Image (cartoon, grey):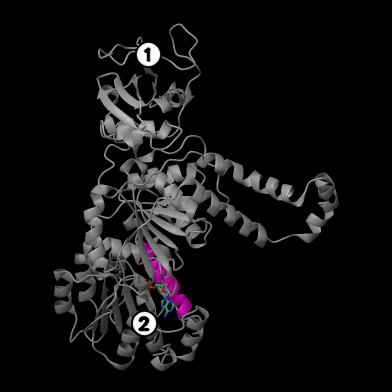
Amino acid sequence: MTFEETGLKPEILKAIAEMGFENPTPIQEQTISHLISSTNDLVALAQTGTGKTAAFGLPVINNTSMQIKEVQTLILCPTRELCLQITRDMDKYSKYIPGFKTIPVYGGADITKQIRELRAGGQVVVGTPGRVHDLIRRKMLNISAIRWLILDEADEMLTMGFKEELDAILSTTPKEKQTLLFSATMPTEIASMKSNYLKDAIEISVGKRNAGAENVEHHYYMVQAKDKYETLKRIADNYPDCYAIVFCRTRMETRDVAEQFMADGYNADALHGDLSQAQRDQVMARFRGKQLQMLVATDVAARGLDVTELTHVINYSLPDDHEVYIHRSGRTGRAGKSGISVSIINLKETGRLKQIEKIARKKFERKMVPGGDEICEKQLFHLIDRVQNVEINETQIGKYLPQILEKFEGMSHDDIVKHFVSLEFNQLLDYYKNSRDLNVRAEGPRDSFQRNDRGSDRDRGGDRMSFSKLFINAGKKQNLNASGLIGLINQYSSRRNVEIGKIDIQRKFSFFEVDSNFEKDLVKALNNVVIEGHVINIGKVESTAETQPRERTSFRREGNSGGGGYAGGRREVRREPAFSDRGDRGGDRGDRPRRKRN
Ligand code: AMP
């Protein structure tokens, strides 16, 4: 079926053609023909991304009489964002119908302005249940003559506790009207709403969960929990052109990840419930306008944010509810485009991922977290592409060209290219030099996080490995545990896969064994680092027979020329995997090169 065949007015066809709509989505096919030809009520099981706004919006606009002064359609939806989104869409669809007006009314905004708009008149009112109910009670909104009632995201409205308001609003609507109820799920409350308020309702379901699901690939990366943030950065670096929402589980996680991400130079911001409405609006506008490349968000805050061109949805944390994953991933791969839904998981979450796989009816593909070389290559060619495509201001550059060429005299073409590329690239190469392998082997937990199976691996290939015993002045008192210590070692060792032997965590200090080849590097890197106000002191235990912990005396500090005290200046470390399991945000040392804001 084409849009022309649906019987919609030419003015509407012109508007949606301009919006790039070529063919109706499945829900649009069913809803538009139903509304144009039948007066029965309708229950549609459809999620965001299926094209449901146009599914009810287009036929409503089409059937609206421009001669009638009263409000003819009431659309109820759960959030202010969705309310504004629907209004924006309705304005676009009705662009060529002179005098057509959709009025948004929602809580948390000046009611007098909304009353003024209602007085001025409009054919459609879109509102959140609380504000609509309030306006009806104040007799500022009259819905006694509506012809269409749309309940959008009805399940969400119930979840958000709008049942009472909905009942009150619905009881003031006229008997003769057509009701359309859209819901992503069909809980019993929706079923009872259907039997209480809808008559002879026809039920439709769009079959597929969303229009884009077919075009979505599902990838996952398996890493240790403490490496999630580092993995996120690598994914972002590996897809330099990505336009993505990064989903977190809680406001706190959202805020932490976003702050760190921004501090590390990524073009990102946060969207969560702790922001004021004005802040949220501003962030969303910047993301929609593509001034922001990545949005770190909670599911609730991202609701109602409608962007069609997401290349990636990143599940920084898997949602508790598996259906929420389907919702999230359906935000990419829309409107004929392809998309990738990425999950960063740890071994313990494999089972949950399998369950989600079943619900999504798609095979999830394990991807390996890219290493430094791979990322640098990607970034290099991305840079070259940008150089190739950059717009050149001939007049301005031309003015200086003779002088520039004079400066380059004597340099070969290759040398000039090398210099320009290095200028952009050195920092990144430096950053990824000796980067660790973050992947966890699926066969079994790399439990020991590169820790050795005592005995066997030590003799790998006949190359007997020798271990050095080290002391560190942190222990249970500082919440250090074995995995926290391993995280610290991994973070500060200059090479990946440093073998770690026996670990002994005491109250104020700990001992551990480490491949002797890395001993010096590690001592140098960790000594005097300040973590949460605690100055790290680390050194070799001179005798491996040493078993009795002794504070400060039994080790040799690298670079310390003698005497007591702590050698070297303190290095305040900004972002640390703190001790114990709070190592989620451990990153690489040093500042990452700032990303270009294209
Ligand atoms: P919705 O499910 O209403 O949130 O729509 C999802 C996105 O798909 C919106 O950005 C719409 O503008 C877009 N869209 C809706 N219908 C079509 C269509 N027939 N062709 C292309 N894009 C569409």
The kind of residue on which mark 1 rests is Phe
**Closer to the camera in the image, 513 or 114:** 513
Position in image of residue 32 (x %, y %): 35, 86
- Residue at 58% across, 56% down: 382
**Closer to the camera in the image, 76 or 271:** 271
Predominant SS of the magenta segment: helix
Q: Is mark 2 within 8 Å of ligand 1?
A: no
**Closer to the camera in the image, 499 or 144:** 499
**In the rendered image, is residue 394 in sight?**
yes
Position in image of residue 396 (x %, y %): 79, 56
**In the rendered image, is residue 79 in sight?**
no
SS state under label 2: loop
The magenta stretch is 79-93
The local crowd at label 1, few if under 14, some if 14 to 19, many if 20 or more residues have their Cα within 10 Å, is some
Q: Residue at label 1?
A: 555
Q: Residue at label 2?
A: 70
Q: Is residue 373 above or below residue 314?
A: above
Q: Is residue 316 magenta?
A: no
- Residue at 43% across, 25% down: 526
- Earlier along the polypeptide chain: callout 1 or callout 2? 2
For discs 1 and 2, the disc positioned in front in the rendered view: 1
Q: Is residue 81 magenta?
A: yes
Q: Is residue 498 above or below residue 223?
A: above
Picture quarter containing residue 74? bottom left
Q: Is mark 1 within 8 Å of ligand 1?
A: no
Position in image of residue 496 (x %, y %): 42, 37
**Closer to the camera in the image, 167 or 234:** 234
- Residue at 28% across, 79% down: 206
**Residue found at the far top of this picture:** 563
